[in-house]
Image: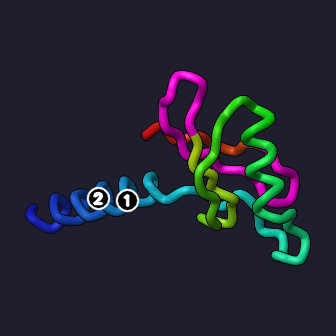
Amino acid sequence: MRFPLVLAAVLVSSSSLSAFAAAPCTTAPKADWKPSTAATEKAVSLGYTTSKVKEEDACWEVYAKDAKGAKFELFFNPVTLDLVRTKAN
């Protein structure tokens, strides 16, 4: 009786961990990526002010603020520069 309960607990905990892992923005080789400055320019064109950009999960992650001063992390596909996801801070 104890084994099914332990197995269920392990399955639930491992499946919830995968929910926190972000999907990569692209699987394209880096030779196909646009420069990080292009992601910064895209964020500015969307009305954000930016402070920093870095690579994260095969995305360009841009640290930005909106017009009200709220902080965001903007994740851009480095090939298409599509905004893939946004994380409020």
What's the residue at 24%, 65% (across, down)?
A: 7
In the rendered image, the residue lying farthest to the left is 2
Instruction: For marks 2 and 1, give the CA distance.
Output: 6 Å
Instruction: Report the predominant secondary structure element of the magenta stretch.
Output: loop
Relative to 18, does residue 50 appear above or below in the rendering?
above
Q: Is residue 32 left or right of residue 19?
A: right
Residue 4 figure quarter = bottom left
Residue 14 percent across, percent down from the top left: 35, 63
Q: Which of labels 2 and 1 is toward the front?
A: 1
**Which span is picked out in magenta?**
65-82
Q: Does the magenta portion include 81? A: yes
For label 1, the SS is helix
Which residue matches tag 2? 13
What's the residue at 58%, 43% (across, down)?
A: 64
For label 2, the SS is helix
Residue closest to the eye, 20 or 78 = 78
Residue 52 percent across, percent down from the top left: 60, 57
- The quarter in which the C terminus is drawn is top left
Relative to 69, does residue 3 appear above or below in the rendering?
below
Mark 2 touching mark 1, by CB under 8 A?
yes
Q: Amino acid at mark 1?
A: Leu
Q: Amino acid at mark 2?
A: Ser
Q: Which mark is residue 17?
A: 1
Residue closest to the eye, 58 or 40 = 40
- The quarter in which the N terminus is drawn is bottom left
Residue 23 percent across, percent down from the top left: 61, 57
Relative to 19, does residue 11 appear above or below in the rendering?
below
Dot 2 crowding, Cα within 10 Å, few <14, some 14–19, many 20+:
few
Residue 3 percent across, percent down from the top left: 15, 68
Q: Which mark is residue 26?
A: none
Q: Does the magenta portion include 48? A: no
What's the residue at 64%, 67% (across, down)?
A: 55
